[in-house]
């Protein structure tokens, strides 16, 4: 699907899951290399930059966690020319929908809030995409805060699965953002050479947004690690307490079973058995043995 937006002599083409005919049409209109046009038809495995004489080709992957509650990436391809910008995506992205509305409003009112060059629009759109990543990070941070409360309210067992799922989200954020570092190193000088020194400050600003997002992801991972260790410690402590109780019960019932077995022996002469109140005497011995064991455990501070 082709979404075409124009402002003055600038054109923005947004391709959503394009087919061969749509890509060929754009390739012919803007004189795009057939090699790059082929890459627009299928998602790329890694982010990369390809600088040509008349345009730049850039591929970036952005994490998308909250929309589908699944760990996955959303790819965006950019072709930045002098008076045109071509973006390609393979699924619906909320940031694009909101940005298209803003762009059309600015074009209708003939305002230059977004700029009128391909590089201006590219930088503005990229910054908005990184802002959406920060929203993902904020949601994960809120989840971790909720998990911390749940852990100390005695829900350690349920938090094992919850922390594992959140760990998958953080790992997806990290794997998606880490390759961007090499891309921006390549773009740092390429954009300045392609569009001029006027964009140096803008590029640095977006790099700051990117590195801030990476730093937040690192902190999230550290927080998750601490919460996992705390949760595992509390869970182990609770399990040890249960095992201690079962062990104590085993030691308490051992003398009772021994006494019952002795007086249940099929012999001709058994002390106490056959005398008056023999049942209560045996029960008294069992109660005394149980009390003795509890006193011993208390002195050893096992209870």
Image (cartoon, rainbow, N blue to C red):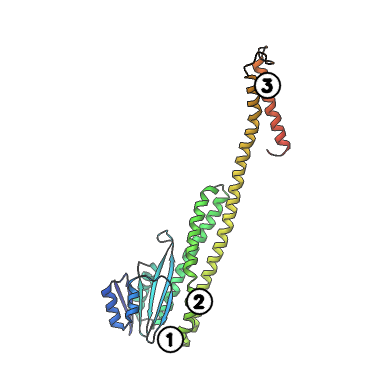
Task: Identify the residue at image location x=70%, y=35%.
Answer: 297
Query: Which one is earlier in the sequence, the residue at label 3 or at label 1?
Result: 1
Nearer to us of marks 1 and 2 is 1
Q: Which residue is mark 1?
A: 194
Q: For this view, does 45 lie left or right of residue 274?
A: left
Query: Which one is earlier in the sequence, the residue at label 1 or at label 2?
Result: 1
What is the spatial separation of the Cα atoms under label 3 and label 2, in whole angstroms?
A: 81 Å
Disc 3 + disc 2, Cβ < 8 Å: no
- The numbered dot on residue 146 is none
- The numbered dot on residue 207 is 2
In the rendered view, would you say 27 is above or below 168?
below
Nearer to us of marks 3 and 2 is 3
Disc 1 + disc 2, Cβ < 8 Å: no
Q: Secondary structure at mark 2?
A: helix
Pick whichever, 66 or 42, lies toward us. 42
Task: Identify the residue at image location x=34%, y=79%.
Answer: 35
Name the spot of residue 138 as percent of width and height, x first.
Answer: 50, 63
Name the spot of residue 75 as percent of width and height, x first.
Answer: 39, 70
> Is the N terminus in the top left, top right, bottom left or bottom right quadrant?
bottom left
Pick whichever, 32 or 126, lies toward us. 32
Name the spot of residue 89 as percent of width and height, x first.
Answer: 36, 71
Q: Does residue 227 appear anywhere in the picture? A: yes
In the rendered view, would you say 83 is above or below 252?
below
Pick whichever, 6 or 299, lies toward us. 299
Q: Which residue is mark 3?
A: 284
- Residue that sits furthest to the right in the current view: 299
């Amino acid at each position: 699907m082709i979404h075409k937006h124009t402002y003055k002599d600038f054109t923005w083409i947004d391709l959503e899951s394009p087919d061969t005919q749509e890509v060929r049409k754009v390739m012919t209109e803007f004189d795009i290399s057939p090699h790059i046009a082929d890459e627009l038809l299928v998602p790329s495995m890694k982010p990369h930059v390809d600088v040509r004489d008349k345009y730049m080709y850039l591929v970036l992957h952005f994490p998308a966690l909250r929309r589908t509650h699944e760990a996955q990436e959303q790819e965006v391809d950019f072709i930045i020319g002098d008076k045109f910008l071509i973006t390609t995506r393979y699924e619906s992205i909320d940031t694009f929908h909101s940005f298209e509305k803003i762009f059309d409003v600015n074009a209708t009112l003939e305002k230059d809030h977004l700029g009128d060059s391909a590089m201006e629009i590219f930088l503005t759109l990229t910054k908005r995409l990184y802002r959406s990543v920060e929203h993902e990070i904020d949601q994960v941070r809120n989840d971790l805060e909720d998990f911390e409360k749940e852990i100390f309210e005695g829900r350690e067992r349920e938090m094992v699965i919850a922390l594992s799922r959140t760990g998958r989200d953080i790992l997806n954020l990290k794997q998606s953002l880490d390759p961007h570092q090499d891309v921006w190193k390549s773009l740092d000088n390429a954009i300045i050479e392609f569009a001029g020194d006027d964009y140096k400050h803008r590029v640095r600003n977006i790099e700051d947004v990117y590195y801030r997002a990476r730093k937040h992801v690192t902190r999230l991972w550290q927080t998750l690690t601490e919460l996992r260790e705390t949760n595992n410690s509390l869970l182990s402590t609770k399990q040890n307490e249960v095992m201690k109780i079962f062990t104590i019960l085993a030691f308490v019932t051992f003398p009772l079973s021994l006494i019952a077995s002795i007086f249940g022996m099929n012999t001709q002469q058994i002390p106490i058995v056959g005398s008056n109140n023999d049942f209560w005497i045996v029960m008294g011995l069992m109660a005394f043995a149980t009390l003795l064991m509890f006193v011993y455990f208390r002195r050893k501070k096992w209870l």
